[in-house]
Image (spheres, helix red, strand yellow):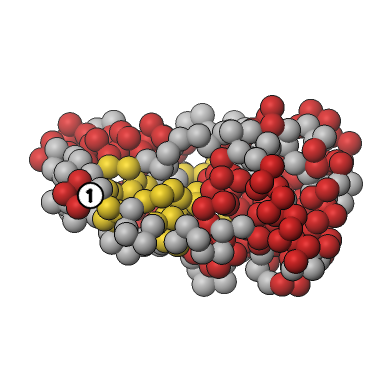
Amino acid sequence: MAVSLLANDVSDLCIGKPAVRALPLSAAAADLAAAVRKGPRAAAAACVAVGPARGAAVLGRAGLADVLCLLCSSPDALARPAAALARPVAALLPKDGAGEVRRVDPRSSVLDALDEILSGAQVLAVPLRNGGRKKQLAGVAGVTTDFCWLTQEDLVRYFLNSISLFYHVAARSVSALGLVRPDFLSVRPDEAALSAVPLIRRAIASETAVAVVSADGHLVGEISTAHLAACDETAAAAIATLSAADLMAYIDYFGSPPEHILRAIKTGLKSKGLDAMLELMEDETMTSFSLSSSSSDDDTGRAYLRRPSSGSFGRRSTEEPVVCSPASSLVAVMVQALAHRVSYLWVLDEEDDCRLAGIVTFADILRVFREQLL
């Protein structure tokens, strides 16, 4: 089984993948936000930071959720958002090795890629072979990428396509396989969203989310890093002033949030003395931003905050958190997660009034397949 399944090399999993957009470490956080915003929404969660010279090693991956965490990282960053956005993207990369990016040879085996992921890499950078598509980031001279991402999702999809080879575990429940982790990230609905920023950073590194859980243990919702990545920098004002529950509502209606949410944000900014953030929120350019008219600003390198129109992204996250039960089979969980483009599922215990029992992640699912290949 292992021989036939692992005959493919890593490049086979990268067929059709686009080259990653790149930024030098010296680029500003605002440049990263602009680069992600101008690209396809499917790539909103990831823009890569590389070394200062062409061909340098891949040093990390960062996106809009990282920019929001930077803006909310300190009282000074919130008070002076323009200065925070002018900081280099190097400031966005984790210092503890979490969310590590590793470069792998395209001729490496799938097993090698799997081992890299299971030993701590969040994502793999795979050089494109001759003839692959390369991209140069507009406005960033000399930075051309020649690699693509290989993610946990790619590996899970690869094993799902060969699930018949794993029939002896495919139908077993996630509970029986020991995949339900009780140590998930969580906050209470009435807790300040700002207090969840360290948890959001950890969720970015683990490609999960922060559960919003009631006092009696029920899942109210989630603060999804993927949904945060579909917002813009002004969401930092919501994080700084709202409760976790209200932040979920803000994200759900991003582009056209309810008036009471906007009033709460503005009132909170005034009470905290965050005048600069308030001025940026009320800037007319934020409400008139459109993706098609952004080209004139792309090459200026200026720090700016702009809000997508509701016609672009509003009410984009209408889905509830994706959940399963402890009795759900491994293959059912894989299909469900891939269908919803998430790398985790919340587990609700039907025998305990559907309280939140834990989380199942792609990383743990991949460990099951690795054990079968020993």
Residue occupied by mark 1: 353
List x then y, in percent, for residue 60: 58, 58
Question: Of helix, strand and loop, which one carries label 1?
Answer: loop
Q: Position of residue 352 (x, y in %)?
A: 19, 52
Out of 28 and 175, give the one closest to the viewer.
175
**Which residue is rendered at x = 33% and y = 48% of the image?**
346
Name which residue lies at 50% across and 61% down.
190
Residue 10, quarter of the rendered image: top left
Q: Amino acid at mark 1?
A: Asp
Q: Is residue 20 visible?
A: no
Seen from the viewer's position, the closer of residues 281 and 44 is 281
Q: Position of residue 106 (x, y in %)?
A: 46, 44
Q: Residues within 10 Å of mark 1 (few under 14, many from 20)?
A: few
Q: Quadrant of the N terminus?
A: top left
**Is 4 displayed left or right of 289 in the figure?**
left
Counting from the top left corner in percent of width and height, residue 233 is at 71, 51
Q: Residue at x 59, y 33 (%)?
A: 315
